[in-house]
Image (cartoon, coloured by chain):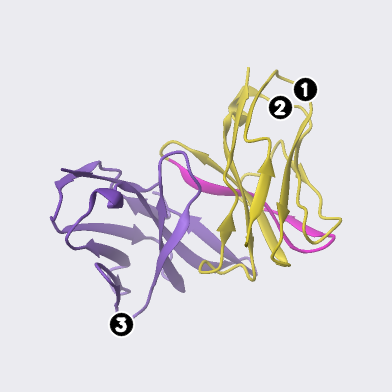
Chain colours: A yellow, B purple
Amino acid sequence: EAQVTQNPRYLITVTGKKLTVTCSQNMNHEYMSWYRQDPGLGLRQIYYSMNVEVTDKGDVPEGYKVSRKEKRNFPLILESPSPNQTSLYFCASSLSPGGNTIYFGEGSWLTVV
Amino acid sequence: RKEVEQDPGPFNVPEGATVAFNCTYSNSASQSFFWYRQDCRKEPKLLMSVYSSGNEDGRFTAQLNRASQYISLLIRDSKLSDSATYLCVVSAMDTGRRALTFGSGTRLQVQP
């Protein structure tokens, strides 16, 4: 079954404590990305990756890092989380950057206090 | 002004009603258009692509008006299970890469 798996699904953490949200896909997709979703703002892209070792900033990259050492994995790293990073995060995977082949993970609810 | 704008709703309609949503976009170079459905606290899922000539998938009809820069989604014979948020998604080239812009969604509540 085609899947994008992200963990943790729910997390409450404190300001400044580094955390990583993992993302893994089983479809051999080259294109992966991270989005955050906030009320009234829609999904905004944080980072994306066109392939292994190829990553680039999306629209709201500040405060985040990513890596793509393997094709299937694309972790999102918050080195020093702040309360404004409280959000719902989605990892996405697709054959191409186009909009008709995207598979989203189930989402990770992150609260930074 | 937002790049992709949608009426947030909610649209409260009775079962069996026909309901239509519009979405306007500001980038005239936008190339591809989609409607996604998102259930409460769940991930978005592709509902349908929107083609220039308009397209239909069962009870759902999507239209594109490039001149006025909007897309629409029509749902006929609404079901309770149609209750969700509908996201308008627009694809365009941005600084050499294809970028997707998501609207903030229109919430539909179908009532018995």
CA distance separating discs 1 and 2? 6 Å
- Residue beneath label 3, please? B53
Q: Are marks 1 and 2 in contact (CB under 8 Å)?
A: yes
- Picture quadrant of residue B64: bottom left
Q: Amino acid at mark 2?
A: Pro
Determine crowd level at label 1: few under 14, some 14-19, many 20+ residues with C-alpha closer than 10 A: few
The answer to whether residue B106 is left or right of residue A6 is left
Q: Is residue B25 left or right of residue B79?
A: right
Q: Residues within 10 Å of mark 3 (few under 14, many from 20)?
A: few
Does the magenta portion include A45? Answer: yes
Residue at point 82% right, 62% down?
A52
The residue segment tinted magenta is: A41-57
Name the amino acid type tagged 1: Lys
x, y percent for residue A89: 59, 41
Vertical side of B67 occupied by B37: above or below: above
**Quadrant in the picture for residue B10:** top left
Identity, as a three-letter code, of the amino acid under mark 3: Ser
Camera-side residue of A32 and A1: A1
Query: Where residue B42 is drawn, which disc sits there?
Result: none
Quarter of the figure with the C terminus of chain A: top right
Q: Position of residue A32 (x, y in %)?
A: 68, 59
Badge 3 and badge 1 both on one subunit: no
- Looking at the picture, does residue B80 appear above or below residue B63? above
Write down the residue under mark 1. Answer: A17
Label 1 vs 2, first from the N-terminus: 1
Residue B21 higher or lower than B29, as above or below:
above
In x, y percent, where is residue B70? 30, 65
Q: Position of residue A99 (x, y in %)?
A: 52, 66
Kindly state the secondary structure of the residue where label 3 is placed.
loop
Closer-to-camera residue (A28/B104): A28
Residue positioned 73% across, 67% down in the render: A28
**Residue A81, disc:** 2
